[in-house]
Every structure is written in C-alpha cells, then in structure tokens.
Amino acid sequence: MRQVETTKVSAVRAFFGSLLAMVVTLVLLGGLGGLFVVLEPQTTSADTLVGGTSYSVPTTGAGLYGSGTLGPWQNLMHRISPEDQIRDTLMFDGVFMFGDSIAVQDSSGLERLITSRTGDSIAVHDWSGQPTSAAVAALEDWSRSYGLPNRIVMAVGTNDIFNPPAFAAQVDRAMRIAGPNRTVYWVDVYASRSKQPAAVREADLANSAWINQQLDEAASRYPNLKIIRWSEFLTAQPGGPQQYLRDGVHTSEPLGSSARNELIVDALSGR
C-alpha cells in the first residue's frame, strides 16, 4: 500500500515539476522575445510627416532685404526616408532629394511619379523652413554615411530669400560634395507670399530673382549643375502663378504639385 502511495506522490511531483519547467521556459522565451523587439532597429516610413503641425516658418520684421528674418524651423514638419530606403536607393543608383516645405508637401507624389515613369527609386530629406545651408549639411551627412547616387535633386532656396547673399556659397559647397561626375538638379525659386503686404511681396520677388541669378551663375561654372526652372514656368502661365500656388510659395493641389513634380521628373529623364 505504501509503495502505491509513494508511486502516486512521485507521479504528482513529476507532473508539477514538468509543468513548472514549461512555465519557466515560456517566461524566458517571452522575455527574450521582448528583448528582440526592443533591440530591433525601428524605421519609419517617409510617408509619415513628423515634427510640428505647420509647413510655414515664422518670420519677423523687414530684415535686411525686405522679406523679414527667418525664424526657428527645426521643429516644423519634415519627411525623411528611413535608412533601409536610403541604402536601397543608393544600391540601384536612384535619386537623392533634399528639399524644404514645398518638397515636404509634394515629394510623396514625386516618388510615385518617378517610380511609374522611370522605375527609379528615390530617398528624401525634406524639412520645412530649412535654408540651403541646412540642406547641404544633410547632403554632406548622407555622403559620409552612405555615399551618393549619380543624380541629386536640390529643392531648396526659397527660405534663402531672407538672406540671399548666403546662397551662392552653399551652392558651391553642394557642388564640391557632389563632385564633378554626378548631376545635381536644382529647382529654382519663386516666392511672393500672398498674405504679406505689397512691399514684402515685392521684396520676395526681388530676392527670389537674386537667388535664381546666383544659381544661373553657378551653372556657368559647373557643367553638371542643371536648373529646373520652376520660376520661369510659373511666370509664363497665361493666368499667372496664382492657380499653381496656394499662398504665393507652396504649390496648390493637385495642379501646382503635379506641375512641379512633372518638371522634376522631366529633368531627371533628360527632357
């Protein structure tokens, strides 16, 4: 009788021992799984806008050149491709693009248009409010971190209307980073902010023309610098730029954004 009871006790102990081992194993596996989730690099889609809720940089006063003084822009909306997309684009010699708030708004559509038209991939670093100096700094950072493809789009300069003399040196800097064997496509500038007084709107136009002149002069020095003439397109329209711009700077949707993206893709396609 005692032998039977002893056997039962041993069986019960063995059962609970096995059950405890299973529970411990599951807990350990769950903990490791959680660790793997924590350690796995997290990427975000470039389709996700981050930062503040505004595209527009605040400005103050008339400034030295009549358009005002550029305010803080670092917390404004931005759109940056994740690292895996950057590396894939480089691997297949696609396109890198560095832009400001117009590009933040339009570059998702540009990606779709480039893919459908040419099959190329594109990685973007678009940040609302940034001046050309900040975009060129991003270009330099990507050059060091990843390398550069053979085609680079610079869609910046609009925020340099607040300090036009600084622009030319940044174009030279970008061209040195790109080197002579890559093609840099630069979208020129049109700004005349419709909500500003007439004097500011006129200053915006004058400063835009000043920036575009510097861009033309740079193109005469760098054969691999190709200008995408957005400003010329706008001023050549029979009804003027108004239908293509919602505020005198940013593109209207879909007409303005589609027109600008078409100009960029045509340039990339050699048209």
Image (cartoon, rainbow, N blue to C red):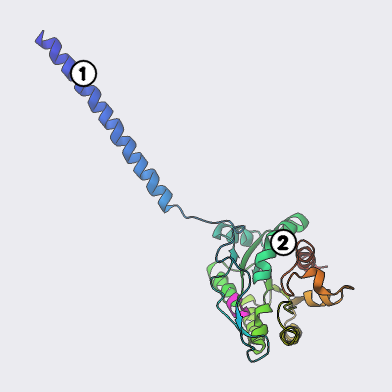
Decide which of 69, 220 is in the foreground and name it. Answer: 69
Compared across the picture, whether 80 is left or right of 33 comes to: right
The residue shown at (68%, 78%) is 158
Compared across the picture, whether 110 is left or right of 21 comes to: right
Q: Is 134 part of what is drawn in magenta?
A: yes
- Counting the numbered discs, the total is 2
Can you identify the residue that label 1 sits on?
Answer: 11
* Residue 213 % position (x, y): 75, 86
* Residue 80 % position (x, y): 59, 64
Of circles 2 and 1, the one toward us is: 2
Marked residue nearer the N-terminal end (2 or 1): 1
Report which quarter residue 119 is drawn in. bottom right
* Residue 165 % position (x, y): 66, 89
Distance from label 2 to label 1 (Cα)? 70 Å
The residue shown at (60%, 59%) is 46
The residue shown at (57%, 80%) is 71
* Residue 7 % position (x, y): 16, 14
The answer to whether 17 is drawn above or below residue 99 in the figure is: above
Residue extending farthest to the left is: 2
Q: Over which residues does the magenta segment extend?
A: 131-135
Secondary structure of the residue carrying numbered label 1: helix
Is residue 151 at least partly visible in the picture?
no
- Label of residue 155 in the image: none
The residue shown at (65%, 82%) is 160
Quadrant, the C terminus: bottom right
Is residue 138 at least partly visible in the picture?
yes
Report which quarter residue 198 is drawn in. bottom right
Can you identify the residue that label 2 sits on?
Answer: 110
Query: Within 10 Å of the Cα at label 2, are there few (<14), some (14-19), or many (20+) other Cα atoms?
Result: many
